[in-house]
Amino acid sequence: MHPEHELSQDTKAILGLKLPTDPRWVNLAEKSLEEILTDHAYCEQKAATSCISLIQRYSRREELVHALAPIVTEEWGHFRLVLSELQKRGLKLGQQRKDEYVQALLDFQITGNAEEKRLLDQLLTMAMIEARSCERFKRLSDGLEDVYMKNFYRRFMESEAGHYTLFIELAELYIDKEKVRKRWNEWLEYEAAVMKTITVRGDRIH
């Protein structure tokens, strides 16, 4: 993938979450800084390892490999940034917790031997996680009282916005754009339904 590559109009049109985060979440997160930073750290770690898994599984798809290799480095750098923030504040990295949100997304993936459908859903899963993370980080950058933490999360928000468009872009590279549009719309509807079932809690990014 080349940095100057323009997103298609289809891609620009289909991005967009159906349900905003409950505004209570920011207030809860602000009271649980150690827990939210811990969960954030593990989210960044899992993003890096998920990209590695995609590279390993689809190593023959050269554009995907070259596009995701720097994302691995960036996500691991984000993990280190969050870890450093915990240390600076005298906080501890807690235990990794089960991510109900991500598990619900994985349950929606098409599996089996049809590589195109499997690849599409894996890329759209990553796009969805990055899109929701971007939206959550925007909530934190707008709603936190701590000015330093507002700026801290604004930087993450800007990074995640670039990531979720990349995963859609990769899907469009390998798969018919109409198929991508149709399936992404299904993902958007499903994700909104998932968000309605998950308890609002301040110790989780998702």
Image (tube, rainbow, N blue to C red):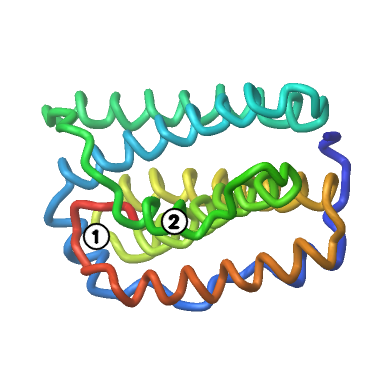
- Residue 194 locus on image (x, y percent): 38, 70
For image coordinates 28% across by 60% down, the residue present is 144
Tell me if 170 is positioned left or right of 190 in this view. right
Quadrant of the image for the N terminus? top right
| Residue 189 sits in quarter | bottom right
What residue is rendered at 35% in x and 57% in y? 101
Counting residues from the N terminus, which is met first, the one under dot 2 or under dot 1?
A: 2
Q: Nearer the viewer, residue 91 or 114?
A: 114
Foreground: 75 or 182?
A: 182
- Specify few, some or many for label 1: CA neighbours under 10 Å numbering under 14, 14-19, or 20 or more: few
Relative depth, front residue between 90 and 39:
39
Tell us which disc is closer to us: 2 or 1.
2
Q: Nearer the viewer, residue 99 or 94?
A: 99
The image position of residue 180, as x and y in percent, is 76, 61
User: Mark 1: which amino acid?
Assistant: Glu
Image-quadrant location for residue 128: bottom right
Q: At 44% from the left edge and 60% from the top edge, which residue is drawn? A: 138
Q: What numbered label is drawn on residue 76?
A: none
Q: Name the residue at 45% across, 77% down.
A: 19
- Pinpoint residue 127: horizontal percent, then vertical percent: 59, 52
To which residue does mark 2 refer? 107
Residue 145 bears which disc, if any?
A: 1
- In the displayed structure, 31 sits above or below 90; it is below
Kindly state the secondary structure of the residue where label 2 is placed: helix
Query: For numbered disc 1, what is the local secondary structure?
Result: loop
Q: Label 2 to label 1, Cα distance in Å?
A: 36 Å
